[in-house]
Image (cartoon, rainbow, N blue to C red):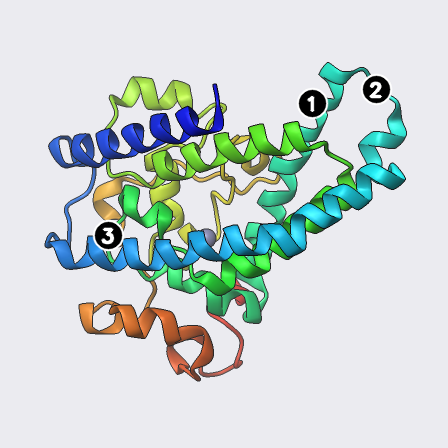
Amino acid sequence: MSKRWGGVAFGVAVVALFIVERLRPLRVRKEPGPARVGRNLAIGLLAGATTAVSEWPVVAPVQALAERRRLGLIRRLGLPPGLRLVLGFLLLDYTLYLWHRLNHHVPFLWRFHAVHHLDLDLDSTTGLRFHFGELGLAALFRAAQVLLLGVDRDTLRLWQQMLVVSVVFHHSNLELPIDLERRLVRFLVTPRMHGIHHSTRPRDTDSNYSSLLSWWDSLHHSLRLNVPQASVTIGVPGFSKPESVTLEASLTLPFRRDPRLRLPASGTTVYGTV
Ligand SMILES: [Zn+2]
């Protein structure tokens, strides 16, 4: 499929998911009006622009350098193309799991990633709601992945396209039949699984860090599925009111000294100590 038709198919899938998650909701909404959707789209537009802009000076030159000098783990192994693709895909997804954990445990990174978790509801639009600073930092991380892992650009493109679809899907508020979701979650991140990660309970948030394949949480014993969705409150402790999550409050959060992001006693972030 060409890039253009791939984009059209993705747009149609997102709109379809946006409609279906309103017909079969998994969790009750706290902010049902259009303001929240508009806010998430605005934050998402800034994030998308940041990714597009950082691709050109950051990721693309590193990719070209790694290809020219034959740098990176996978290039050194001398594997056949099929195996290179599978191994590259798995390593990209596994290192993203590690990056997501770092985003919760390094105070500087959490300031940016918290903006994504600030949403009081979880649906397909949350999957677009990332602070532009987080995606700028993610571009640096992506460049490091390309350089150290030695993945080729086709593998990177395939994984990125599947990741975007997965991110919108697992943030959605779609109630899938439980038997289907139990089968899917054996290998993919699903809406119920990721909903637990967005809970205000630190024990829940410190779980389910995978973004596409769910295996990494199983591997590191961070998989948590036995939490009823009705008991999950979406958001970040201390930011439960709509006034705390406005567009301005969300975009400025990483640059403010906000005591709600810290534990009063230790001075470390809430999730950094779990
Ligand atoms: Zn997270």
Q: Secondary structure at mark 1?
A: helix
Q: Which residue is mark 1?
A: 85
Q: Residues within 10 Å of mark 1 (few under 14, many from 20)?
A: many
Q: Residue 5: where, in percent of width, then height? A: 40, 24
Q: Which residue is mark 2?
A: 79
Mark number displayed over residue 121: 3
Q: Residues within 10 Å of mark 2 (few under 14, many from 20)?
A: few
**Residue 241: quarter of image:** bottom left
Which residue sits at x=76%, y=42%?
Answer: 64
**Residue 85: quarter of image:** top right
Which residue sits at x=33%, y=67%?
Answer: 237
Relative placement, left or right, of 25 versus 261 is left
Q: Residue 155: where, in percent of width, then height? A: 65, 28
- Is residue 9 in view? yes
Q: Secondary structure at mark 3?
A: loop
* Amino acid found under the numbered disc labelled 2: Leu
**Do callouts 3 and 2 mark residues in contact (Cβ within 8 Å)?**
no
Which residue is more in the foreground, 173 or 50? 50
Measured Cα–Cα span from mark 1 to mark 2: 9 Å
Relative placement, left or right, of 179 versus 72 is left
Select label 3 or label 2 by which is in front.
2
Q: Secondary structure at mark 2?
A: loop
* Amino acid found under the numbered disc labelled 3: Asp
**Do callouts 3 and 1 mark residues in contact (Cβ within 8 Å)?**
no
Which residue sits at x=41%, y=50%?
Answer: 204
Q: Residue 166: where, in percent of width, then height? A: 43, 33
